[in-house]
Amino acid sequence: MPQFDDDLFLGVAVTNMGTAQPGLGNPSPMTEGVGPLGRIYVWDTVPATKAANNLVTTVTPTGAQALTVVAGAGVTAVTRADGTSAFQLDVPRAVSVTQVAAGTARNFTVTGFDFYGQPMSEVIASVAGSTVNGKKAFHQITGVSVSGATTTAVTVGTSDILGCPVRFTDRGYIARVGWNNTLAADAATVTPADTATATTTTGDVRGTVLPTSAPDGTRRLVVAVLLTGLQCGPNSTRAGALGVTQA
């Protein structure tokens, strides 16, 4: 029997289940066990404080244009292995667009990469005088552009919507959300993975969690995610574990 030490697949489990057990109607022997069995993935992170302008500081676009991205609080300028310059967030999280006053709402296109280096993009439609959070969890940002003039100032920053490292397609797969050193479970806003073919307007391919109170760089988030056989068994797939391919 093969042995793998990464706890994703521990090999075939032998059992006597179903071998002429009384009352079971003598089903066929299950010599290959009852697997694949699932696992629990522990997602442990201490997110920094969000900021409305830590990616794009206050600017009033005069037309369709690329905006200047900066490395504000919780953001680090990095050079990827392929030589691409990017701005890395402290943890994968959704981007926010703030249009500070009445003006013309526009589409903002955010491009970058996820936690596993997959290229991704999202279109976020601004709302005059409000902040709009995106749905996708970015790990690195390579650009932000706007579709036209807004006639009022805008900023782009980070939100408290945090991206899970593994896919969950139902809230029932979240065994527990622990937050801020408290034994009681946190009533977080949990959004399952979007399983549709990814576009610039679909949701996160793995799922997101929004805690009840704001991260501040000291509060710890611990989420227990139940993994199915499609994610950790011998028949697991990349899409099962990490979601559909980003777009």
Image: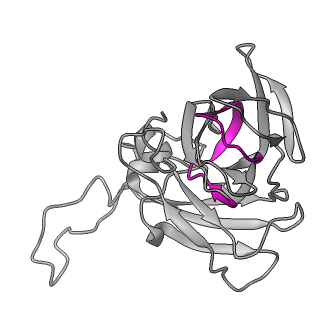
Q: Quadrant of the N terminus?
A: top left
Q: With respect to residue 155, does 38 lie above or below?
A: below
Q: Is residue 221 above or below residue 68?
A: below
Return the x and y of residue 68 as percentages of the image width and height.
79, 29
- Residue 9 seen in render: no
Query: In this rendering, would 174 be left or right of 73?
Result: left
Q: Is residue 148 magenta?
A: yes
Q: Quadrant of residue 119?
A: top right
Front residue of 220/108: it is 108
The spot of residue 25 in percent (x, y) is 9, 77
Residue 136, can we see it? yes
Q: Residue 38's image quarter?
A: bottom left
- Residue 105 in the figure: left or right of residue 46: left
Q: Which residues are magenta?
A: 129-154
Report the colour scheme: one colour
The residue under the point 69% across, 71% down is 211
Residue 9 magenta-drawn?
Answer: no
Answer with the quarter of the image where residue 214 lies: bottom right
| Residue drawn at the location 59% of the way across and 49% of the way down | 105
